[in-house]
Image: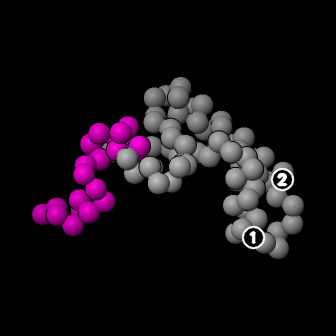
Amino acid sequence: MQGVFLFDDDESQIKANLRMREPDGGDMTARARVSWLCGEALRRECDRIGVPALNARPWQTLTERVRGVLPDAGPGPDRRAHAT
């Protein structure tokens, strides 16, 4: 089994995402900061133990970047459909 950790290095983007998901949630500054700090701590731990960690953005290239760090990931998302 293989895995990759995705993180967002842009605290303002995290805040914008929280506001979009919870428009009546009030000020999201502190919550975004905590989320960013947790993500950074997990990213550093991934570096320490050798787990691939990738920035989730740009989203358009995420699949290719994941395949680049997980060479056994195969050609695409439909691999299971061809399993026998």
Mark earlier in primary sequence (2, 1): 1
Please say if 16 is above or below 42. Answer: below
Q: To which residue does mark 1 refer?
A: 22
Nearest the viewer among 23 and 48 is 23
What residue is pinned by disc 2? 29
Mark 2 residue crowding within 10 angstroms, few (<14) / some (14–19) / many (20+):
some
Describe the element under mark 1 as helix, strand or loop: loop
Q: Return the residue nearer the eye: 55 or 31.
A: 55
Disc 2 from disc 1: Cα separation: 13 Å
Q: Is residue 23 left or right of residue 51?
A: right
Residue depicted at x 82% and y 73%:
24
Looking at the image, residue 5 sits to the left or right of residue 19; the answer is left
Which residue occupies 69% across, 61% down?
Answer: 17
Give the percent coordinates (x, y) of residue 56.
Answer: 54, 48
Indicate the position of residue 70 as horizontal and vertical percent values: 34, 40
Q: Give percent across and percent down for residue 67.
A: 34, 44
Q: Is residue 18 above or below residue 41?
A: below
Q: Quadrant of the N terminus?
A: top left
Colour scheme in use = one colour
- The amino acid type of the residue labelled 2 equals Thr
Residue 8 located left or right of residue 62: right
Whether residue 3 is visible: no
Give the residue at the far top of this rendering: 48
Direction from residue 11 to residue 84 in the image, left or right: left
Report the residue at 65% width, 36% height from top: 41
Residue reaching furthest right?
27
> Residue drawn at (26%, 63%), measured in percent from left and top?
78
Query: What stretch of residues is rendered in magenta?
Result: 65-84
Amino acid type indicated by mark 1: Glu
